[in-house]
Image (cartoon, rainbow, N blue to C red):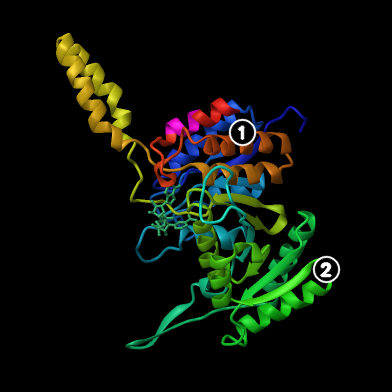
């Protein structure tokens, strides 16, 4: 390919608020003239026997070929005979590390203004191996799998990340005092890798104590690496330190150089699809204009405006936008990444356009427009 060829990237808009925030990313990328060509894939409504999941084999193949993608949140339909969508992606694409940066946003006041953390979550095993069964009635068992291979791989990634990004410390978060075999092995692997990186300070913290310290003083930590379940919990805790799930991005690192960016949050069914009425507004207004005389039209328009105000799309697209920025950095499109990140941060800092989760009144659409204006 030549320098002018666009880069192909897979896009999964996902469920719930997914399509709304994915639209926001597409719009910002268009405005910033990012040389990316999206290959959009939707989650099907039938199980693909080749993947045993609602995700088709073609969707997985698209990520394997492009080696880079962005995914919106996916809600796994409840029922038997299929695998969770997120688990399918993680397993099939071998997405072994999930990197979640979390830093205080300038101009958006929270309890702390100096949060600057990176959590690195092992993404393929632990309690998320999906191995659960009933032993006898009233007794169930879940297998927590920790392997030397997966632990070394994620530890290696954490130290490599710390070194490449000029970070000083890596802390491994564990509960090896109780989970002696599983977390014990994870810890042992981290110690082994730490020896190869004498320039990076290595620390260990027990998960419960780590939670207390994070809430008391987040500056005590730098890069944190941990098994799957702890990573899930700690990264939401970290999101809470800077203003919530609407803000925190992540990047999944897979075998063979695959990178799949996604927001930390889920499909937010409580606020999803609220833009339906605002989409209908022009249609309703047009009908009113045709059918009624002018006075009634004005009154009708006012009524529709009032009724639809709180029904606009509410989702904060920042987390997915910042995930797309991570994707651009991974592709070494640093100028575009910087430009878009600055536009997002400046829009939030300015405070004129903010979504409801940050105490503002802007819809997803208005907030996105404001970001485009800042570009
Ligand atoms: P959630 O993250 O969807 O929502 C938690 C809370 O945060 C909700 O009140 C929601 O409104 C709010 N929130 C989340 N993202 C927001 C945003 N961008 N802007 C404003 N507010 C936001 O978690 P949940 O409700 O536990 O899960 C809902 C569904 O999402 C479930 O089906 C779950 O399995 C799925 N899920 C998917 C992923 C993923 O695809 N990676 C991650 C987590 C949950």
- Where disc 2 sits, the SS reads loop
**Residue 124 found in image quarter:** bottom right
**Residue 172 found in image quarter:** bottom right
- Compared to residue 148, the image places residue 270 above or below, namely above
Q: Position of residue 102 (x, y in %)?
A: 59, 54
Q: Position of residue 276 (x, y in %)?
A: 31, 35
Q: Give the residue number, with chain letter if any, for mark 1.
A: 37
- Compared to residue 90, the image places residue 174 above or below, namely below
Q: Position of residue 27 (x, y in %)?
A: 52, 30
3D distance between C-alphas at marks 2 and 1: 38 Å
**Which residue is at 35% across, 62% downward?**
78
- For residue 172: magenta? no
Relative depth, front residue between 371 and 334? 371
**Which residue is at 78% across, 77% downward?**
192
- Compared to residue 94, the image places residue 182 above or below, namely below
- For residue 368: magenta? yes
The magenta stretch is: 365-369
- Where disc 1 sits, the SS reads strand
Sequence-first tag of 2 and 1:
1
Work out whether residue 260 can be spotted: yes
Q: Residues within 10 Å of mark 2 (few under 14, many from 20)?
A: some
Any atom of ligand 1 within 8 Å of the CB at mark 1? no
- Compared to residue 147, the image places residue 46 above or below, namely above
Q: Give the residue number, with chain letter if any, for mark 2.
A: 197
Work out whether residue 97 can be spotted: no
**View extreme (bottom): residue:** 136
């Amino acid at each position: 390919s030549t320098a002018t060829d666009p880069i192909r990237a897979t896009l999964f808009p996902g469920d719930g608020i997914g399509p709304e925030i994915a639209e926001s990313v597409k719009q910002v990328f268009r405005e910033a003239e990012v040389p990316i060509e999206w290959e959009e894939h939707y989650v099907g409504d039938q199980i693909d026997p080749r993947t045993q999941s609602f995700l088709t084999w073609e969707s997985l193949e698209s990520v394997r070929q492009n080696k880079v993608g962005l995914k919106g949140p996916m809600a796994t339909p409840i029922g038997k005979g299929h695998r969770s969508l997120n688990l399918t992606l993680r397993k099939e694409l071998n997405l072994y590390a999930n990197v979640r940066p979390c830093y205080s946003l300038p101009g958006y006041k929270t309890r702390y203004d100096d949060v600057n953390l990176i959590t690195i979550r092992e993404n393929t095993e632990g309690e998320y191996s999906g191995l659960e069964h009933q032993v006898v009635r009233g007794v169930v068992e879940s297998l927590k799998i920790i392997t030397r291979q997966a632990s070394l791989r994620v530890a290696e990634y954490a130290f490599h990340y710390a070194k490449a990004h000029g970070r000083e410390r890596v802390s491994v978060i564990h509960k090896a005092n109780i989970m002696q075999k599983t977390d014990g092995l994870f810890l042992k692997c981290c110690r082994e890798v730490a020896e190869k990186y004498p320039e990076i300070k290595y620390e260990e913290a027990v998960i419960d104590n780590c939670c207390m310290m994070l809430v008391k003083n987040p500056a005590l930590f730098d890069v944190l690496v941990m098994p799957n379940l702890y990573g899930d919990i700690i990264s939401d805790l970290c999101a809470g330190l800077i203003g919530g799930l609407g803000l925190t991005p992540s990047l999944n690192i897979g075998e063979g150089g695959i990178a799949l960016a996604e927001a930390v949050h889920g499909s937010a069914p409580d606020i999803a699809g609220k833009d339906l009425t605002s989409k209908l507004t022009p249609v309703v207004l047009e009908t009113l204009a045709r059918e009624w005389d002018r006075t009634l039209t004005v009154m009708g328009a006012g009524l529709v405006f009032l009724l639809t105000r709180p029904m606009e799309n509410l989702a904060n697209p920042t987390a997915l936008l910042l995930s797309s920025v991570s994707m651009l950095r991974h592709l070494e499109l640093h100028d575009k990444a910087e430009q878009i990140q600055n536009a997002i941060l400046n829009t939030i800092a300015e405070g004129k356009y903010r979504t409801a989760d940050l105490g503002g009144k802007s819809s997803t659409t208005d907030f996105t427009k404001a970001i485009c204006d800042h570009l």
